[in-house]
Amino acid sequence: MNTISYFGTIDYIFMGLYVLVLIFLGFYLKRLASRSLDNYICGGKNIPWWAMGISGMASFLDLAGTAVIVSFLFLMGPKGLFIEFRGGAVLVLPFMMLWTGKWHRRSGCLTGAEWNIYRFGDCWGGRASQLMGVIATVLTTIGMLAYLIIGAGVFLSTFLPYSPEACSLTLLVMATLYTMMSGFYGVIFTDLFQVAIILVAVIYISFKAFTGVVDVEEISQIAMKVTGSPDWTKGSLQWNVHVPQGYEAYKHLLIFSSFYLIRTVVAGLGTGADPRYFGAKNDSECGKLSMLWTVLMTVRWPMMMGIAVMGLYLVNDLLPEQSKLKDAAAMIHQEHPEITKSQWGTLVSSISNTPEKHAPALVGSLKSLLGEDKWIEKMNLLSFEGTVNPEKILSSVLVMSVAEGMRGVLVIALIAAALSTFGSWVNLATGQFVNDFYKKWIRPKAETSELIYASWGTVVGIVACSFLFSLTLDSINDIWGWMMMGFGAGFLVPAFLRFYWWRFNGAGSAIGTLIGIVAAIIQRWFWPELNEIWQFVFVLTIGFVSSVIVALVTEPTNPDVLEKMYRETRPFGVWGHLKQKLSPEERKNASREHRQDLIALPFALVWQTTLFLAPMLLIIHNWTGFAVASTICVGCFAAIWFFWYRHQAQENLDK
């Protein structure tokens, strides 16, 4: 079967229009973005809060993440949400909504790295912390882009007769060009355009999946046959869940989700250095854009649950005997004994799309085993272990369960999601590199035009490094797990301590971040098989001990710098002697604000979790679970309004 037949004329028309709009936006917004570095990085504080909230949703709805989450929903049902406590469920949003977003905005800074100068002073410790902030952001961006590149390559190679690397490289070139030209304006306004396309995909997939399910008993039986999971339709946390070969680490779901939640809490306490918050006009806008961001993220989950459901029906019809996949994988391993897991996708794509380049005996045996008519589709689902590859469910559903025309729209929607996330990460890293490294250390007197050109060069460099790094990785889940639980843990402690402990200084932040990053890289190099829990414990412990020790054996932050930062930002934590310098009225207001923020946090976390869980239970007709989750969601939202939002709307409008 020729892969080109997956798309019809109308699909190509939609794709062509999409590319033309992106090109137009890139050139049109180039003029606005080039007026100043402030405009390029955070839109010059002229972008409406609702636009930034919509953009935030688009930036978190990425293609690779969607494929990973669909894979866990396919394997576990709605319970797959709890695996994504590690990052995909974005439970850092409540912290950003309640306090870390407004704390960053109050600084008046342009980037998160510049915030370190604001916190620690323009001394060697502050500058070192600023520099490490740039390094950490750039390295994180390279890792995140590598993860996105793998996901895009795996996805597109299902539709096109090219390798995953060739597909992702083509997408990267297009994304790099418009991100370079338009900066943060491009991030925001292309996100608004792309969210409209994404919503069409959400509505179509959710409706098709919902109407395709007869009842919860039927989908439960099919899930049992396809995945082996006896309780696939349940949405509650369980001690043990059934998982296939290659996913054994996630068997103890309760333990893993608890560790993921701890990781999210630590990360959330130190988050908020997003250009959207630096670009907000007041505290009220920070809260409103975060709440809109969270509500809009909900649409992602019924779409992903719908794809997982359609995947169950597809695999049940296409592969009633999954043992044939193990035999097919054994044939390929026998013919290519040197093949590694990271090379598997390219090899399978090559066998499917260019069978003439491979041994006729191997291709003939695969066709005979899998069936002449749909052997390519079955090959696309073949994992390294000889099972159904859950990371290919997304693309396989679009190929086989969606009609021409709508298939093109859905592919565009997922590409739009990938480009939105790409643009946000690249803009974040580029802004910090140019503003906090190039301008600070290399060319402090550089004019705006030079800084814009430096930004363009930085974009190209970061994207090139990301593509090369992606070639060394095994799977989407492999890099996502390490980025969240290993590498990401390297700088969680410094990011946390700088907000909540007055004695923490620039030296502790810089050296603690450096040691944490090195520890994560060493773990990845020497113990890559370490599971995600121990990655997190190992790196976090080293980062915590090193950060605290270095802070205590070096000079504290300049008292004047510290007092200015505290008076303007008003964080809670161990700030006792500084809080006493406030007037009685200021202390009273700060304590009331902190109390409102903290009381609302558990309600916000549960609200967001049930907000995502309820529509997934609706898709699979689990009416009881849907009613329970919806009731809890509404109750938590009422608590958020009573304890927090009504006070924010009245008191924080002009802060």
Image (cartoon, rainbow, N blue to C red):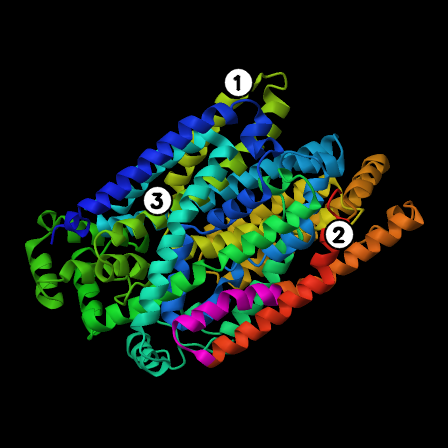
Q: How far, Cα to Cα, is label 1 from label 2? A: 43 Å
Quick check: 6 left or right of 450?
A: left
Residue 458 versus residue 297: which sits nearer the camera? 297
Residue 351 lies left or right of residue 621; in this view the side is left
Residue at 24% over, 73% down: 316
Please name the residue shown 68% across and 53% down the image: 544
Disc 3 marks which amino acid? Leu
Disc 1 vs disc 3: Cβ atoms closer than 8 Å?
no
Decide which of tag 3 and tag 2 comes sooner along the chain.
3
Marks 2 and 3: in contact by CB < 8 Å? no
Mark 1 nearby-residue class (10 Å; few <14, some 14–19, many ≥20):
few
User: Residue 44, image x and y in percent?
Assistant: 60, 30
Say above or below: 643 vs 322.
above
Q: Which residue lies under the disc numbered 3?
A: 471
* Label 2 element class: helix
Mark 2 surroundings: few (<14), some (14-19) or many (≥20) residues within 10 A: few
Q: Is residue 567 left or right of residue 523?
A: right
Label 1 vs label 3, nearer the camera? 1
Q: Which SS class for mark 3?
A: loop
Residue 2 against residue 323 in the figure, above or below? above
Q: CA distance from mark 3 to mark 2?
A: 52 Å
| Residue type for callout 1 | Glu
Give percent across and percent down for residue 214. 31, 78
Q: Position of residue 320 (x, y in %)?
A: 20, 75
Vertical side of 65 occupied by 600: above or below: below
Mark 2 lies on residue: 650
Q: Which residues are magenta?
A: 605-623
| Mark 1 residue element | helix
* Residue, disc 1: 450
Q: Residue at x 10, y 57 (%)?
A: 363
